[in-house]
């Protein structure tokens, strides 16, 4: 055994034997000095209250700029002006609008004679000209302009007896019927001058029309510089202008064989302007105008069928037959003969139909974008069928027409 005293004193401790108690006391002088009072728990630094975020200044809504009342746009727009010769004594001035016709006031002026029409809250389409030369009956011209915030339309007259104003059923066309004979009848309208036959001019030659004959004007769509729609058949490009000319020529032959007088807008690969085609029919006092076209639609090769268009702007009963009735007659004959899909009678304001003074339609024979229909339309026998059916519809229509005296 290692003595307790030896070890304890070697380590610097004091050793005492407490005999009465049977104990050994081991103490150290340094321990008491080194044993410090219990260290006080460190006082926690007070946690600083979080600094409050600065109160945002309330955003002041910007003062709204004073509202400026927009200037009211005109409620309606005049879209077209044309005339119809009702007879040798009366001329109708037709004025079309984009919607129901606005309120108007009308009055006459003299020295020279004029009829003045002021349209309230109305403007005019960019296509409406400042002046239209009429030279029909006692109406010399129509002028259009602005006057004190209204749209003013003035009819320049060469003496007149009376006039009346009415509206179409949908109130989108205003009719001004002027009665009276010109003091000095205007010289006959000159027939279109024959132009050189090139790719951009008309090769139309006008022929005298016997009095009382119901002249039919046929129009082959496109031509010359305007090839129209195109399709491909057996690697060959087919142009609409060629198909329309061929079908129109055959239609002309059928009509003339049945005793009708026919005038065509083009007889070759030329391009009469659209307005020239309608004007030709007007100048000749035609009974009916028929424009022949071939349809097309992109990315829909299965589209097929036949349809006929007329213009609502030229659908009066002036000739005892409306353009719509003629369209229905022609389409019915075509569907029966050709066996194609009936796409119906439709409306569109094509220049060649809306500008005519007589019943006028535009025929879409079939789709050049449909290979099956294109193949048929390139076939001479099928073209004859098409021509005969168009002619049958025309003859049925023209027989009902009563020409103005």
Image (cartoon, rainbow, N blue to C red):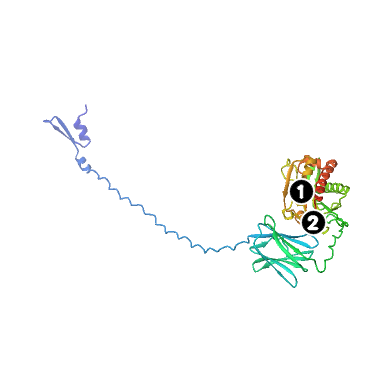
The picture quadrant where one finds residue 167 is bottom right
Q: Nearer the viewer, residue 180 or 391?
A: 180
Q: Tell me what residue is drawn at x 76 percent, y 48 percent.
A: 327
The answer to whether residue 221 is seen in the rendering is: no
Q: Residue at label 2?
A: 278
Q: Nearer the viewer, residue 281 or 269?
A: 281
The answer to whether residue 331 is seen in the rendering is: yes
| Residue found farthest to the front | 161
* Crowd rating for badge 2 (residues with CA inside 10 Å; few <14, some 14–19, many 20+): many
Q: CA distance from mark 2 to mark 1?
A: 17 Å
Q: Nearer the viewer, residue 240 or 380?
A: 380
* Crowd rating for badge 1 (residues with CA inside 10 Å; few <14, some 14–19, many 20+): many
The picture quadrant where one finds residue 184 is bottom right
Q: Tell me what residue is drawn at x 20 percent, y 31 percent.
A: 4
Could you tell me residue 237's position as x and y percent?
Answer: 80, 44
Query: Does 104 sit above or below residue 351?
Result: below
Could you tell me residue 367's position as x and y percent?
Answer: 76, 44
Sequence-first tag of 2 and 1: 2
Is residue 232 shown left or right of residue 73?
A: right
Callout 1 secondary element: helix
Could you tell me residue 266's position as x and y percent?
Answer: 84, 53
Is residue 44 shown left or right of residue 297?
A: left
Q: Nearer the viewer, residue 320 or 127?
A: 320
Mark 2 vs mark 1, foreground winner is: 1
Callout 2 secondary element: helix
Q: Residue at label 1?
A: 327
| Residue found farthest to the top | 1
């Amino acid at each position: 055994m290692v003595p307790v005293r030896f070890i304890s004193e070697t380590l610097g401790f004091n050793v005492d034997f407490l005999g009465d108690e049977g104990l050994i006391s081991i103490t150290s002088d340094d321990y008491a000095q080194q044993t410090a009072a219990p260290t006080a728990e460190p006082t926690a630094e007070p946690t600083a209250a979080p600094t409050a975020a600065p109160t945002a200044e309330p955003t002041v809504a910007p003062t709204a700029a004073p509202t400026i009342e927009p200037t009211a746009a005109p409620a309606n727009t005049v879209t077209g002006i044309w005339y119809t010769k009702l007879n040798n004594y009366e001329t109708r001035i037709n004025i079309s609008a984009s919607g129901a016709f606005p309120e108007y006031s009308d009055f006459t002026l003299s020295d020279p004679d004029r009829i003045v029409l002021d349209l309230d809250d109305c403007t005019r389409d960019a296509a409406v000209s400042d002046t239209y030369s009429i030279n029909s009956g006692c109406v010399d011209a129509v002028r259009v302009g602005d006057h004190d915030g209204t749209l003013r339309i003035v009819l320049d007259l060469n003496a007149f007896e009376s006039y009346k104003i009415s509206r179409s059923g949908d109130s989108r066309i205003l009719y001004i019927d002027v009665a009276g004979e010109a003091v000095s009848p205007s010289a006959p309208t000159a027939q279109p001058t024959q132009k050189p036959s090139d790719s951009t001019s008309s090769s139309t030659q006008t022929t005298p029309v016997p009095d009382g004959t119901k002249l039919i004007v046929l129009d082959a769509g496109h031509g010359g510089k305007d090839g129209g729609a195109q399709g491909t058949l057996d690697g060959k490009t087919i142009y609409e202008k060629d198909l329309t000319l061929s079908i129109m020529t055959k239609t002309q032959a059928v009509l003339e064989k049945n005793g009708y007088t026919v005038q065509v807008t083009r007889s070759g690969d030329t391009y009469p302007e659209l307005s020239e085609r309608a004007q030709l029919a007007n100048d000749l006092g035609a009974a009916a105008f028929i424009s022949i076209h071939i349809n097309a639609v992109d990315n829909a090769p299965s589209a097929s069928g036949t349809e006929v268009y007329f213009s609502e702007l030229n659908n009066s009963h002036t000739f005892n037959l409306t353009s719509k009735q003629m369209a229905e007659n022609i389409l019915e004959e075509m569907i029966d003969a050709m066996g194609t899909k009936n796409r119906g009678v439709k409306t569109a304001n094509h220049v060649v139909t809306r500008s005519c003074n007589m019943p006028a339609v535009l025929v879409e024979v079939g789709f050049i974008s449909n290979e099956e229909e294109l193949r048929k339309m390139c076939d001479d026998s099928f073209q004859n069928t098409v021509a005969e059916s168009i002619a049958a519809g025309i003859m049925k229509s023209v027989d009902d027409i009563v020409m103005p005296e």
